[in-house]
Image (spheres, helix red, strand yellow):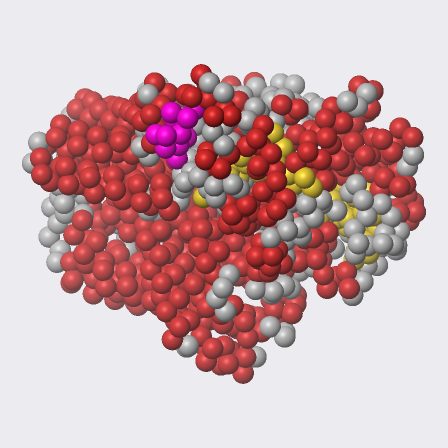
């Protein structure tokens, strides 16, 4: 085994192969930085170019590209609160507040040090566990997958902070959203509103970008200031500090990267939950986390980032050992395997062991190179956070829209993005925790799927599988502890004396009513569905209704005197002395800009709209000089044209202008 | 859907087409210097995508005028989004065609509400593969052949209500009286294979033979899985001793099986919008078949482990037309089987 590892190292040190690896890594970084694009589309497009390469160079190139998208995605997450890929959502929670405090350099440096260590450790772990991979994996069946997903949901209790019932309600809504679309059992179209867009379910991307990214951008817009308006920290000093932060927390890095590698290795759980698992783990185990997380604690950046990069090593496991890809990028890699005549399976761990180890080395090298490059550049990136908002915001908003459209190439993505942007902003404003919603959304459909498989196959006996039993007990404990703690807290505060009933209603309570109405409407719509299709929606819908009702009543009747008694598990924006009326007016204006963008896109196509939008925004918001405005608008338009029209070949939707004057369809996107 | 790559000249040509006879322009003149878009009804990286991208790299050389063929992914609703678009909104001048689910042309017949198109009006360019699917049992189940399958239960993994892995065992159970128990809900075929390996399910039915060959040939060679049945319109040369499903029934039953499994001939189908001008459609169909014999194409397909057993456009069209001529009684029986 060691011999094979050393042989593979020799193979990979070939300069040509290293050059391919470096090229893949640089491309992966760029793709990861573009919100919504990610590495999958790039991998598929570049796959044919690897046909002619030798297998080692091909894998070096593809793995390099795939492994570092979760390195590149940190930059928009920290700077703008925009997760570059679904794997960077948790990074936003502490990374973005750090950038607001002027610590973008520190946050990025800490993230890259963590990415590097996590990525390399994940690769080492993979290398060491190769001999026992297959036997272990054969113990993970559908019941075990189900148990892992339930365990993930149980983290909602921690991620909800001081408001467990709001968390539970949000998670319920998230699960209900995940059940939209054709159900896997009977094919019933659930809540699809007769659109083909919702046939396969609501895609993760517009939901995640809407819930997390748009609210942050709206708040930047409302503040009318640079992201780090009053930054004092020197960028390079911050970078050093960030690197030191990660080294100091090396135990956390090791724990989270182990977690990342392990979850990555389980096919079916999906890469979108890895960062939340790590974040939830850090929240439970790190000292003082409940007070500082969500407010710019560097450890809240280190945890998801180290797990994120370890995941890629992990997801190689099911791909090479069983031919079951652990992530979308691995599915494409599997295609590359076959092209180069490699059959996944036991042989990859015996006679083709050197190839497997070459892959492990590729991942390790790519992480070192990718994180190293980003680390060196993070000082430059950090400076973006000090730019005027009129320079940054219009560009990000355009790229976000194109990126979201790239997901399923459908207008539905843009509506969903705007809709969830409004929902996310209101939740954030009213201090409702957003992470449970996204966690419910990611895990809900997985739980339903494996619940059916497990029950159909084993009846209820699947609960008694040893691994399942242990994980389920852990989940119950994790879920119950904060709820019980909350209850005891209240008892202690009221010292056994029943507080007098005192009715009070606050704006945040209204969201309970909205969510209850939403759940009720969905529940009502399950009439007439087959039992397979209706079972999960009815159970989850009822629990959501109940949680919201209890939450509403307990708030209205026994409002705790100081609501800030516990931790609020989400990013909070400080608008200083801005009056609430102006806040809402500015928020309305922000979403009006987005609606105008969509209107213009329907009229004249996305690429001309991007040019027009940037120009209009920069002139209307702050009378930026014309030369600057035009060159930024032109540059962005060219960029979108090259990347999305020429490289990714997006099929643009039809436009009114194109229908009126067909001759203009010569122009891209009209 | 905007039709980006139409040049100004093409716009004018379309106008001319509307006003005057198409014969004014030869096929070669039309395609020369033009871009043809090959739409893929799935996301990147899957089987349909791999086949289509390979075709796009070679087919342009065989169309008069040598247009550039550009693959474009338009995924959604198991490719129904693309079929609906091709049927209703796509340009009909021969510059657009696409690859969709092999079952799609039959969806309106078997009552899929989301499939609101007339399959008989679509243009059929060809199919790259006459698919042969198999049903297998894992070793140690004691199931060695179809007869065993009628007495012993085989637990097969399914990948969704409309997937072959669910519909094929349902039909075989109903017609041949086999006892396959379907555990539905796995995200993909590879997950079913893994479930089989760890003993969660004991078989897989509706598994494309070419995929067995490229991913799990060792299981077949070492006897880890036993191939019980092959499902297609004709036997695969690799499997002379495995019974073909349509040979196991006669009369109405056999007609029903033929109808359901006609989709196998459309393994990797290429379909265009209705009303493509006759001469251009013929040129596309001929170019398709010529590509299927192009040594460069075949060499690359071999490298990708893609099986190439082409079926011509007119043949594919005939299969679809025949299916729609089936008596209502048989169609109803199929609907009943699939809905259970």
Q: Is residue A268 visible?
A: yes
* In the foreground, A456 or A588: A588
Image quadrant where one finds the C terminus of chain B? top right
Say left or right for B167 vs B270.
right
State the image coordinates of residue A303 (x, y, percent, origin top left): 37, 57
Indicate whether A191 appears above or below A87: above
Name the residue: 75% across, 35% down: B262
Place residue A255 in its image quadrant.
Answer: bottom left
State the image coordinates of residue A600 (x, y, percent, origin top left): 28, 24
Q: Is residue A90 visible?
A: no
Name the residue: 66% across, 50% down: B308
Indicate whether A287 appears above or below B231: below
* In the foreground, A66 or A310: A66
Indicate whether A443 appears above or below A580: below
Q: Is residue B7 magenta?
A: yes
* In the foreground, A297 or B219: B219
Name the residue: 78% across, 42% down: B232
Say left or right for B148 vs B329.
right
Say left or right for A398 vs A620.
right
Furthest-bottom residue in this view = A3
State the image coordinates of residue B339 (x, y, percent, origin top left): 74, 27
Q: Which residues are magenta?
A: B2-14
Q: Is residue B71 magenta?
A: no
State the image coordinates of residue A169 (x, y, percent, origin top left): 46, 31
């Amino acid at each position: 085994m060691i011999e094979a590892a050393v042989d593979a190292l020799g193979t990979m040190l070939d300069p040509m192969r290293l050059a391919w690896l470096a090229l893949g890594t640089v491309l992966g970084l760029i793709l990861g930085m573009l919100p919504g694009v990610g590495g999958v589309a790039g991998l598929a497009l570049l796959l044919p170019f690897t046909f002619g390469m030798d297998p080692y160079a091909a894998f070096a190139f593809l793995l390099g590209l795939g492994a570092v998208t979760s390195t590149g995605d940190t930059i928009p997450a920290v700077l703008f609160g925009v997760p570059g890929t679904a794997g960077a959502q948790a990074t936003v929670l502490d990374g973005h507040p750090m950038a607001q405090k002027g610590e973008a350099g520190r946050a990025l440096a800490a993230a890259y040090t963590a990415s590097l260590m996590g990525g390399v450790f994940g690769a080492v772990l993979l290398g060491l566990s190769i001999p026992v991979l297959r036997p272990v994996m054969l113990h993970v069946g559908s019941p075990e997958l189900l148990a892992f997903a339930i365990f993930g949901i149980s983290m909602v209790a921690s991620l909800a902070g001081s408001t467990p019932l709001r968390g539970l309600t949000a998670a319920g809504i998230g699960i209900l959203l995940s059940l939209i679309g054709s159900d896997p059992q009977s094919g019933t179209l659930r809540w699809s509103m007769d659109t083909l867009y919702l046939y396969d379910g609501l895609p993760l991307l517009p939901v995640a970008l809407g819930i997390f990214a748009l609210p942050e951008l709206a708040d930047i817009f409302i503040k009318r200031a640079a992201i780090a308006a009053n930054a004092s920290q020197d960028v390079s000093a911050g970078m050093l500090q960030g690197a030191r932060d990660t080294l100091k927390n090396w135990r956390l890095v090791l724990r989270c990267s182990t977690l990342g590698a392990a979850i990555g290795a389980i096919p079916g759980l999906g890469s979108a939950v890895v960062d939340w698992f790590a974040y939830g783990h850090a929240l439970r185990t790190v000292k003082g986390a409940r007070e500082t997380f969500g407010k710019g604690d560097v450890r809240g950046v280190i945890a998801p980032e180290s797990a994120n990069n370890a995941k890629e090593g992990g997801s190689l496991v099911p791909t090479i050992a069983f031919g079951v890809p652990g992530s979308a990028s691995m599915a494409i890699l599997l295609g590359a395997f076959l092209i180069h005549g490699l059959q996944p399976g036991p042989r990859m761990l015996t006679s083709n062991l050197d190839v497997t180890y070459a892959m492990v080395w590729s991942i390790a090298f790519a992480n070192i190179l990718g994180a190293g490059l980003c680390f060196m550049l993070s000082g430059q990136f950090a400076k973006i956070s000090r730019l005027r908002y009129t320079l940054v915001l219009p560009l990000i908003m355009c790229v976000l829209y194109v990126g979201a459209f790239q997901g399923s190439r459908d207008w539905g993505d843009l509506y969903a993005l705007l809709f969830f942007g409004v929902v996310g902003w209101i939740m954030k404003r009213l201090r409702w925790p957003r992470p449970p919603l996204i966690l419910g959304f990611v895990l809900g459909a997985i739980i339903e799927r494996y619940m059916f498989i497990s029950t159909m196959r084993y009846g209820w006996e699947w609960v008694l599988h040893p691994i399942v039993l242990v994980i389920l007990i852990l989940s119950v404990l994790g879920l119950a502890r904060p709820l019980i703690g909350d209850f005891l807290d209240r008892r202690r505060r009221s010292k056994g004396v029943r507080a007098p009933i005192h009715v009070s209603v606050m704006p945040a309570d209204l969201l309970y009513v909205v969510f209850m109405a939403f759940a009720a409407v969905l529940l009502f719509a399950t009439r007439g569905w087959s039992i397979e299709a209706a079972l999960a929606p009815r159970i989850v819908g009822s629990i959501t209704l109940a949680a919201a009702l209890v939450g509403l009543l307990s708030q209205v009747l026994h409002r705790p005197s100081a609501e800030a008694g516990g931790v609020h598990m989400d990013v909070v924006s400080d608008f200083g002395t801005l009056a609430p009326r102006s806040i809402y007016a500015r928020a309305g204006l922000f979403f009006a800009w987005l609606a105008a963008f969509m209107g213009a896109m329907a009229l004249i196509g996305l690429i001309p709209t991007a040019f027009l939008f940037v120009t209009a925004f920069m002139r209307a918001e702050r009378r930026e000089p014309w030369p600057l405005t035009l060159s930024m608008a032109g540059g962005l338009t060219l960029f979108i044209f090259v990347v999305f029209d020429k490289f990714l070949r997006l099929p643009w939707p039809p436009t009114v202008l194109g229908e009126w004057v067909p001759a203009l369809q010569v122009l891209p996107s009209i | 859907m905007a039709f980006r790559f139409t040049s100004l000249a093409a716009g004018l040509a379309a106008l001319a087409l509307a006003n005057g006879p198409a014969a004014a322009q030869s096929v070669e003149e039309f395609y020369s210097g033009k871009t043809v878009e090959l739409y893929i009804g799935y996301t990147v990286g899957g089987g349909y995508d791999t086949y289509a991208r390979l075709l796009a790299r070679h087919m342009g050389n065989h169309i008069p005028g040598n247009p550039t063929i550009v693959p474009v992914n338009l995924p959604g609703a198991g490719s129904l989004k693309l079929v609906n678009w091709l049927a209703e909104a796509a340009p009909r001048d021969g510059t657009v065609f696409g690859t969709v689910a092999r079952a799609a042309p039959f969806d309106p017949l078997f009552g899929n509400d989301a499939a609101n198109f007339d399959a008989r009006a679509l243009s059929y360019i060809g199919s790259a593969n006459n698919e042969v699917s198999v049903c297998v049992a894992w070793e140690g189940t004691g199931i060695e052949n179809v007869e065993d399958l009628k007495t012993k239960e085989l637990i097969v993994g399914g990948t969704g209500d409309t997937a072959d892995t669910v519909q094929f065992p349902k039909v075989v159970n109903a017609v041949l009286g086999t006892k396959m128990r379907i555990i539905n809900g796995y995200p993909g075929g590879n997950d079913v294979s893994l479930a089989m390996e760890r003993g969660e399910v004991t078989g897989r039915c509706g598994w494309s033979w070419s995929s067995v060959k490229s991913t799990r040939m060792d299981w077949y060679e070492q006897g880890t899985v036993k191939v019980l049945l092959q499902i297609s319109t004709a036997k695969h040369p690799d499997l002379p001793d495995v019974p073909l499903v349509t040979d196991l029934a006669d009369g109405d039953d056999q007609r029903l099986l033929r109808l359901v499994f006609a989709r196998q001939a459309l393994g990797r189908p290429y379909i265009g919008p209705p009303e493509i001008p006759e001469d251009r459609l013929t040129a596309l169909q001929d170019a398709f078949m010529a590509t299927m014999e192009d040594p460069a194409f075949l060499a690359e397909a071999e490298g990708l482990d893609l099986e190439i057993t082409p079926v011509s456009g007119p043949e594919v069209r005939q299969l679809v037309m025949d299916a729609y001529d089936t008596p209502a009684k048989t169609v109803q029986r199929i609907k009943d089987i699939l809905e259970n």
